Image (cartoon, rainbow, N blue to C red):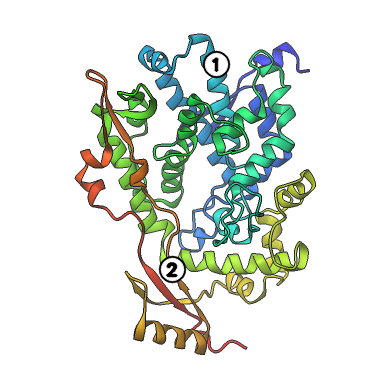
């Protein structure tokens, strides 16, 4: 049990976006845990530094930032009496909800694979009894599954038994409910607060757009953070259901955030050289895992504490050491020598006929790869950001307000051909 003085102590971490991020004793204990410190050894943007040399920031600082961003958003929402009324919340319930949101935001990336999303190529397939399993489609575990497992297996005591939370009655299940855990029944408010962590207008993307732009040295991902926070609200439909929304007077800042994300996808996340390094890293990681973890080159499933510990033992440093020891095979050598497959051609449609035959002939002759593009939509119209007008309780979608959003493509459609131009593979 921590002493009273330690319980009340506030810790500050300097941050280039927020100035200072403030943490209480429980949050600092989580940050100082070995599993959270691992995030210092997980690069936020994988091998993007092969293109933008300063892109060396980590999941550690991003996780702190998401906690601060989510906290700022919630505080603005909670200070409005109308939003509390719509959610049927009393003032004394606010500290508990704020704490759940902060912990969910802090721990949302705790289960990320080495080199972030590039490492997800080595995620194992879902078993047939998993809620997301589909018989005719290969669905795999995600980093969210590992984050949820880590919170349940490894952080439960820090969440439930720390003195800071002794009067709040917070359980690990309250945290994972905001991260997509499907084992419990969602409540009306948990569905809303989940949108602050993972949604069209969430603290996660709000932080990474600003942070990635800052570290890379570009302006594509910038938007007015203070304006966004000040316009967050809870709307109410005619059916009296509540939802996360933007005040009508601030819809332009929601538009600017979506445009910023589109530009970052186009210019950074979907950069032609960055994409091919994702491919090489995925193949090299699988080769390393074949020798150290599993014959199929996959991470262990997040189903037991032992499996989880083995998974979390793997970080960028460990994989980089294996790459340096030449355990990554052909693709590992490509990464070490920065000699990726070269961009050859691209299409805005699926190649077929003569185009596909020519591409396959080049791959057969020299070796290569066809990148069929991003799998994640940068903006989902079926989950359109809601704009709420307080004076008459009217709601509309962002795409109805913004001609720009309505006209933009929903998914980067560039399909690219890469060729190994160093000669025939042996």
Image position, residue 47 (x, y; %) = 54, 60
Q: Which residue is mark 1?
A: 95
Q: Quadrant of residue 104?
A: top right
Left of 315 or right of it: where is 51? left
Q: Is residue 19 visible?
A: no
Q: Is residue 402 visible?
A: yes
Is residue 73 shown above or below 120? above
Is residue 379 shown above or below 298? above
**Residue drawn where x is 66% and y is 12% of the image:** 167
Image position, residue 115 (x, y; %) = 59, 56
**CA neighbours of label 2 inside 10 A, class few (<14), some (14 to 19), many (20+):** some
Foreground tag (1 vs 2)? 2
Depth check, front residue: 108 or 400: 400
**Residue drawn where x is 61% and y is 27% of the image:** 174
Residue 372, which numbered label?
Answer: 2
Is residue 246 shown above or below 290? above
Q: Mark 2 and mark 1 in contact (Cβ < 8 Å)? A: no
Image position, residue 301 (x, y; %) = 70, 52
Left of 220 or right of it: where is 208? right
Q: Quadrant of residue 23?
A: top right
Q: Quadrant of residue 125?
A: bottom right
Question: Quadrant location of the N terminus?
Answer: top right
Left of 317 or right of it: where is 138? left
Is residue 265 shown above or below 90? below
Residue 40, which numbered label?
Answer: none
Image position, residue 36 (x, y; %) = 67, 39
Secondary structure beneath dot 1 equals: helix
- Marks 1 and 2, how far apart at CA: 46 Å
**CA neighbours of label 1 inside 10 A, class few (<14), some (14 to 19), many (20+):** few
Q: Earlier in the sequence, mark 1 or mark 2?
A: 1
């Amino acid at each position: 049990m921590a002493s009273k003085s330690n319980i009340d102590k506030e810790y500050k971490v300097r941050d280039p976006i927020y100035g200072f991020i403030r943490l209480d004793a429980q949050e600092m204990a989580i940050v100082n845990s070995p599993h959270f410190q691992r995030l210092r050894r997980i690069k936020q943007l994988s091998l993007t530094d092969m293109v933008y040399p300063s892109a060396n920031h980590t999941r550690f600082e991003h996780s702190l930032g998401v906690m601060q961003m989510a906290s700022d958003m919630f505080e603005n929402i909670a200070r409005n009496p109308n939003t509390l009324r719509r959610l049927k919340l009393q003032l004394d319930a606010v500290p508990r909800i704020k704490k759940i949101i902060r912990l969910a935001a802090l721990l949302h990336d705790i289960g990320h694979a080495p080199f972030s999303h590039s490492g997800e190529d080595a995620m194992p397939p879902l078993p047939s009894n998993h809620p997301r399993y589909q018989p005719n489609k290969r669905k795999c575990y995600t980093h969210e599954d590992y984050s949820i497992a880590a919170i349940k297996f490894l952080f439960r005591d820090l969440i439930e038994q720390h003195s800071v939370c002794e009067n709040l009655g917070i359980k690990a299940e309250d945290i994972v409910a905001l991260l997509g855990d499907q084992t419990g029944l969602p409540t009306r408010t948990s569905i809303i607060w989940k949108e602050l962590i993972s949604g069209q207008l969430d603290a996660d993307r709000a932080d990474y757009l600003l942070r990635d732009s800052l570290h890379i040295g570009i302006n594509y991902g910038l938007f007015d953070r203070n304006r966004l926070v000040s316009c967050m609200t809870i709307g109410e439909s005619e059916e009296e259901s509540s939802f996360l929304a933007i005040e009508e007077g601030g819809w332009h800042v929601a538009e600017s955030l979506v445009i910023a994300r589109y530009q970052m996808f186009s210019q950074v996340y979907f950069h032609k050289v960055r994409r091919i390094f994702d491919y090489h890293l995925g193949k090299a990681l699988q080769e390393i895992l074949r020798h150290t973890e599993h014959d199929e080159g996959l991470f262990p499933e997040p189903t037991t504490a032992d499996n989880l510990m083995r998974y979390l033992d793997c970080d960028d440093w460990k994989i980089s050491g294996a790459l340096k020891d030449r355990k990554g095979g052909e693709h590992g050598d490509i990464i070490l020598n920065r000699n990726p497959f070269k961009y050859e051609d691209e299409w805005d449609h699926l190649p077929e006929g003569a185009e596909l035959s020519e591409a396959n002939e080049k791959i057969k002759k020299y070796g290569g790869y066809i990148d069929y593009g991003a799998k994640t939509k940068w903006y989902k119209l079926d989950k359109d950001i809601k704009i709420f007008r307080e004076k008459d309780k009217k709601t509309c979608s962002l795409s109805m307000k913004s001609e720009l959003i309505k006209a933009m493509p929903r998914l980067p459609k560039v399909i690219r051909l890469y060729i190994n131009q160093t000669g025939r593979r042996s």
